[in-house]
Image (cartoon, rainbow, N blue to C red):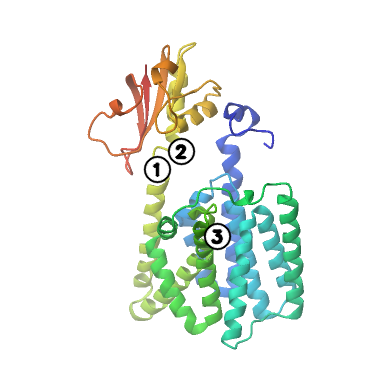
């Protein structure tokens, strides 16, 4: 894959870059994440909160979505939060082996992506708050040495990685606005989960204040970090805060445990299960909506490209807007796919299309009628592939010109 170029997508499928090959390992890693983090969480939270946490991870739309994205997010999620849990256990029990394991996980997370180092802010604030509140931090001299070694390894990695790059090139990108990042994180986590997590934090503070504060820090520090990047004009996006999801879900699991215990004591097991079922149902509904809508992504492109491939005659051109052109290049392995003018390109469409052509466009806005007159060039609408329930106005339209 190292030799593949982003501007030569027609070569990807023949090189073995298929949806199944790219997504299956990530999906398996997502499942393993639930198992690993659940088992490590058992000693911290207990049996039932751990099971609730696993259920929340399994049904979380954000976790489910990232479990099929062929990028680094799920690997980072596992290593980052494994380091967080092992750090807490190490400082609670004074075990050097766990401290070493925690730093190893953080180093591996760093080599997945340098943004993993924001966990140092979580650890630093945890120690600082403990000092200010005059309670034991659990940090031993040997732990500081292990942390210093891990930090030195990461610093060496930074120097080796960016030594030959232009200054600041590691952070070139488009800053997402602060309101969009903040509300996007709440949306991706889910408002019911956020509310339950707040309850969990409040209740956990009474029994284990340090754990409550540590999880709260782990929940908000990623957002604060990228809000800072946005202010400075560096690359920032809500997806980079994904690692904070685990802490939100852990606090929500604690909140559910409190609700179950309170209701069960008064009204029994059946009544106690209802709040859990209600929360899990909201996640399941959100999963369906999120996975079957979204401007005609996922399976709709596959269906549209299969239609064009079946009906396209010899020598007929094929093209569309920017995303459609990428899809044509990938699915049809067509290097000469046309990029039609519009919001993604300038020019005259009729100058580009000088013969019979198949034109593909995304439709991602509600419409009460034919909107083809708004497109730079169309013909006869031959087929459309739209979402059936959630966002049915989102479709892939195929025209023959």
Give the mark toward the camera: 2 or 1.
1
Q: CA distance from mark 2 to mark 1?
A: 9 Å
Residue 299 is situated, as x and y percent measured from the top left of the image, at 45, 36
Identify the residue at horizontal 38%, vertical 81% (top origin). Answer: 265
| Mark before the other along the chain sequence, 3 or 1 | 3
The local secondary structure at tag 3 comes to: helix
**Residue lying at the far bottom of the rendered structure:** 134
The local secondary structure at tag 1 comes to: loop
Q: Are marks 3 and 2 in contact (CB under 8 Å)?
A: no
The local secondary structure at tag 2 comes to: loop
Circle 1 residue = 294
Q: Are marks 2 and 1 in contact (CB under 8 Å)?
A: yes
Q: Nearer the viewer, residue 335 or 253?
A: 335
Circle 1 residues within 10 Å: few <14, some 14–19, many ≥20:
some
Residue 65 can be seen, yes or no: yes
Circle 2 residue = 298
Identify the residue at horizontal 37%, vertical 72% (top origin). Answer: 272
Residue 277 can be seen, yes or no: no
Q: Nearer the viewer, residue 137 or 386?
A: 137
Quarter of image, res 192:
bottom left
Q: CA distance from mark 3 to mark 1?
A: 23 Å
Q: Are marks 3 and 1 in contact (CB under 8 Å)?
A: no
Identify the residue at horizontal 70%, vertical 60% (top origin). Answer: 107
Residue 328 is situated, as x and y percent measured from the top left of the image, at 49, 26
Quarter of image, res 178:
bottom left
| Mark before the other along the chain sequence, 3 or 2 | 3
The vertical placement of 232 against 393, above or below, is: below
The vertical placement of 287 against 356, above or below, is: below
Circle 3 residues within 10 Å: few <14, some 14–19, many ≥20:
many
């Amino acid at each position: 894959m190292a030799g593949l170029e982003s501007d030569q997508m027609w070569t990807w499928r023949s090189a073995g870059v298929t949806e199944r090959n790219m997504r299956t390992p990530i999906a398996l890693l997502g499942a393993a994440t639930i198992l690993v983090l659940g088992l490590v969480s058992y000693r911290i939270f207990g049996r039932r909160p751990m099971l609730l946490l696993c259920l929340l991870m399994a049904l979380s739309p954000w976790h489910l979505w990232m479990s099929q994205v062929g990028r680094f997010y799920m690997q980072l999620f596992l290593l980052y939060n494994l380091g967080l849990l092992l750090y807490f256990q190490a400082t609670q029990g004074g075990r050097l082996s766990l401290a070493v394991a925690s730093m190893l996980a953080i180093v591996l997370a760093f080599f997945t992506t340098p943004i993993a180092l924001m966990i140092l802010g979580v650890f630093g604030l945890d120690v600082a708050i403990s000092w200010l509140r005059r309670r034991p931090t659990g940090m031993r001299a040997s732990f500081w040495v292990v942390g210093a070694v891990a930090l030195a390894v990461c610093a060496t990695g930074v120097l080796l990685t960016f030594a030959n790059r232009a200054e600041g090139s590691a952070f070139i990108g488009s800053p997402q606005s602060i309101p969009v990042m903040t509300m996007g994180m709440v949306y991706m986590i889910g408002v019911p989960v956020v509310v339950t997590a707040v309850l969990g934090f409040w209740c956990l503070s009474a029994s284990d204040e340090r754990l409550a504060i540590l999880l709260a820090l782990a929940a908000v520090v990623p957002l604060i970090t990228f809000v800072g990047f946005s202010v400075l004009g560096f690359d920032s996006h809500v997806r980079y805060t994904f690692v904070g999801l685990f802490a939100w879900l852990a606090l929500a699991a604690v909140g559910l445990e409190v609700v179950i215990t309170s209701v069960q004591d008064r009204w029994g097991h059946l009544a106690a299960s209802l709040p859990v079922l209600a929360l899990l149902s909201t996640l399941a509904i959100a999963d369906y909506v999120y996975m079957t809508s979204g401007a005609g992504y996922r399976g709709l492109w596959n269906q549209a490209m299969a239609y064009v491939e079946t009906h396209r005659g010899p020598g007929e051109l094929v093209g569309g807007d920017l995303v459609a052109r990428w899809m044509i290049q990938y699915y049809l392995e067509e290097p000469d796919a046309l990029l039609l003018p519009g919001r993604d390109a300038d020019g005259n469409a009729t100058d580009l299309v000088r013969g019979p052509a198949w034109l593909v466009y995304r439709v991602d806005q509600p419409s009460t009628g034919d909107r083809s007159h708004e497109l730079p060039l169309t013909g006869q609408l031959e087929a459309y592939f739209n979402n059936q329930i959630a966002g049915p106005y989102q479709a892939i339209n195929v025209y023959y010109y």
